[in-house]
Image (cartoon, rainbow, N blue to C red):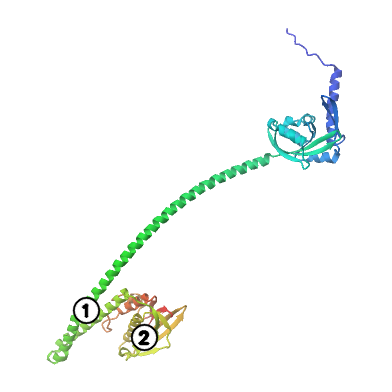
Amino acid sequence: MKTMARRPRKPASELEELRSRLELAEQTLEAIRSGEVDALLVAGPGGDKVFTLKAADKPYRLLIEAMNEGALTVLLDGTILYCNNRFAQMVRRPIGTVIGGSIFDFIEPRKRPLLKTSLRAVPPEGAKSEFTLQGELPLVVQLSLSAVEIESGNAVAVVATDLTERKNYEWLLQRQNADLERRVTERTADLKASNTALRIAQQELSRQALKLEEEVAARTSELQESMKSLEQFCYTIAHDLRAPLRAMHGFSSALVDECGPQLDDRGRGYARRIVEAAGRMDALIRDLLAYGRLNSGELPLVRTDLNLLVDQFVTSEQAAAAKINVQAPLPKVTANPTALKQVLENLLANATKFVLPGVVPQVEVFAKERNGWVRVHIKDNGIGIDPQYHERIFRVFERLSGKEYPGTGIGLAIVQKGVERMGGRAGVESEPGKGSCFWIELPKA
């Protein structure tokens, strides 16, 4: 059987002494913290020393204990005379092991020389520096130093502010700034690439636009040459067609006049039909030429007197059998006098022509001004037009009436084309049996 070595027991008196000293230390610390005493006994190589704070009253200590920052009073050599609970929590040590120790034990080694220098030479306005407290978890703090006086000499009041939250915020801010800079850099690169692509696209667009303009100019020139050639061709054809037509009309008229008695009724009927057909063909050619001139010719616009153009028709033989009432004076308009004269003549001629047999044509001419425009109305008591044909009648070769009303089917097409070339509009309001009211609208002069 093995025997265990027994540790020598300490005498009961020694244990009792240790308990007494521990109890005394705890009471001393509590007394210092509560303000019951203002001194601390610190053992040193030269013997024990007693330190007393000048202003260590109870309210001051209560304030220190309530602070969220760590608070210490240290000697110039770093000895901690006092600290609050918050500083003990920062270094994760019992407060009893902190008081009486050295502040340098809780500072990272590389910063200890700086703190030693700072403790020995604290300026009147105080000093602040960042340090890392050593412990279970390193803690970055700001130490604010202020010189204080105690009975046995000079000391330094130290306030330790936890910078963890601020450092975390600074780290987050730096990260956000770095991310923002990265995004700005990427966005800038994207914008530069987009600008480069846009510049290239603009250059290509300009090149294409220039090419298109050149093509349009060339095409326009070709078209103008074609129009001139076509116009010359039309005039040539018209001249060549009208010459034999005039001969047919002349000889057939002479045949009716001079040889009529020698012809029977059928022969005279044939001769009259030839005369009428030649006349219709001549009128058709004249109207086609007029329509062609409106399409291709230049129409300079000037201040034009409507009264003068209407009066020229009213006093003509074509209007002799009609009653035409003009609500003068009519406003002046911006138009081409030649084209406008042809437009008005066609409208007034239609107004006096398309009436029932035995009815005297009654025509009213009046104008209304509105928003810088003049609308000229030509109202008649004619046969009227079904609303479904109001647009169709302005097309070339569109005739709604039978042979009892002469015409080529081009007159209203000339009206619309001429008004459009002068920057205006044309239209009609009509119903069968209720007459018609044609109108043209032109800019007021």
Percent from the top left, x then y, of residue 275?
19, 85
Disc 1 marks a residue whose amino acid type is: His
Q: Residue at x 67, y 42 (%)?
A: 166
Residue 398 seen in render: no
| Disc 1 element | helix
Q: Report the residue marked by disc 2.
A: 309
Q: SS of the residue at dot 2? A: helix
Please state which of residues 109 and 100 is positioned toward the viewer in this rendering.
109
Of residues 391 and 200, the one drawn nearer to the viewer in this rendering: 200
In the picture, the quarter occupied by the C terminus is bottom left
Q: Residue furthest left?
A: 262
The disc label shown at residue 196, or none: none
- Percent position (x, y) of residue 397? 28, 76
Residue drawn at point x = 31 percent, y = 65 percent: 219
Front in this rendered view, residue 24 or 431: 24
Q: Residue furthest bottom?
A: 261
Residue tagged 1? 239
Measuring from the top left, give residue 205's x and y in whole percent: 40, 57
| Mark nearer the N terminus (1 vs 2) | 1
User: Which residue type carries mark 2?
Assistant: Leu
Q: Position of residue 136 (x, y in %)?
A: 69, 30
Relative to 169, residue 134 above or below: above
Q: Are there few (<14), some (14-19), or many (20+) residues within 10 Å of tag 1?
A: few
Badge 2 density bin: few <14, some 14–19, many ≥20, Cα 10 Å: some
Q: Residue furthest top?
A: 1
Q: Quadrant of the N terminus?
A: top right
Describe residue 244's horizontal placement relative to residue 345 as left or right. left
Q: Is residue 30 visible?
A: yes
Work out how far the residue at label 1 is from the one at label 2, CA to CA, in angstroms.
29 Å
Q: Relative to the observer, which residue lies in front, 3 or 108?
A: 108
